[in-house]
Image (cartoon, rainbow, N blue to C red):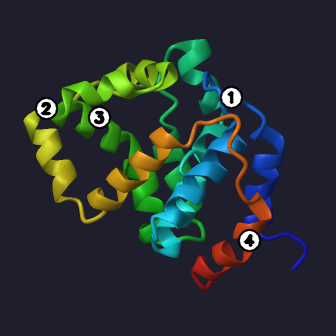
Amino acid sequence: MTSTFIDSVFALFDKFGSEHYGEDASQLQHALQCAQLARQHGCSDSLIAASLLHDIGQFLDDAGNAAVKLHTDGQHETTGASYLSAVFGPEVTEPVRLHVDAKRYLCTMQPDYRDGLSGASQLSLELQGGTMSDEEAESFLANRYAKAALLLRSFDDAGKRPDWQVPGLDTYRAMLQSLQRAS
């Protein structure tokens, strides 16, 4: 097979990975740092993959520029999860889909959490609905992937250092291939 889904994902990183979308680290640096944090934390391969790919929706339909340039929510979490669901199961796609809700949940439950967010994350938070209602928070916590999404969120917040060198994208190829569902 000359082209695989993983090749198309890597091509998206080649095309858009140098974008910053309001952060100090590039999108590629951010993705690799999040995955490295998941590795260091001893997470499952599925959560490492979700950490690596959680912002892939930023590269689709110009969602990455939605907040900064258009002041609208690009819904990159749902776009990304939908895109990834072509080959990955919910153990990868659901933490991706829920990582924005995890931010909203943490802002609701830990009011000082918001102060630690980057400027770009604070801007997107407002566009993504702000803090959750009690019902939304309860519903979020009831999701079987909420804990994974909260963990991914912690990596998302910490993986924004422009000077941290971590293993490259190709070091994840075999793992990503092993996680693909059989067609």
Question: Could you tell me if the residues under marks 1 and 3 are in contact, i.e. CB atoms within 8 Å?
Answer: no
Q: Residues under labels 1 and 3: Cα distance?
A: 22 Å
Question: Can the viewer see residue 166?
Answer: yes
Q: Residues under labels 2 and 4: Cα distance?
A: 39 Å
- Up the image or down, 117 lies above or below 29; here it is above
Question: Which disc, if any, is residue 20?
Answer: 1
Question: Which disc, if any, is residue 104?
Answer: 3
Q: Residues within 10 Å of mark 1 (few under 14, many from 20)?
A: some
Q: Amino acid at mark 2?
A: Ser
Question: Which disc, if any, is residue 133?
Answer: 2
Q: Residues under labels 4 and 1: Cα distance?
A: 23 Å
Q: Amino acid at mark 1?
A: His
Q: Residues under labels 2 and 1: Cα distance?
A: 31 Å
Q: Amino acid at mark 4?
A: Arg
Question: Can the viewer see residue 60?
Answer: no
Where is residue 32 shown, x and y percent of the image? 66, 52
Given residues 168 and 123, the one toward you in this image is 168
Question: Could you tell me if the residues under marks 2 and 3 are in contact, i.e. CB atoms within 8 Å?
Answer: no
Lower sequence index among marks 2 and 3: 3
Lower sequence index among marks 2 and 4: 2
Q: Residues within 10 Å of mark 3 (few under 14, many from 20)?
A: many
Lower sequence index among marks 1 and 3: 1
Given residues 61 and 115, the one toward you in this image is 115
- Up the image or down, 166 lies above or below 132; here it is below
Where is residue 62 shown, x and y percent of the image? 67, 31
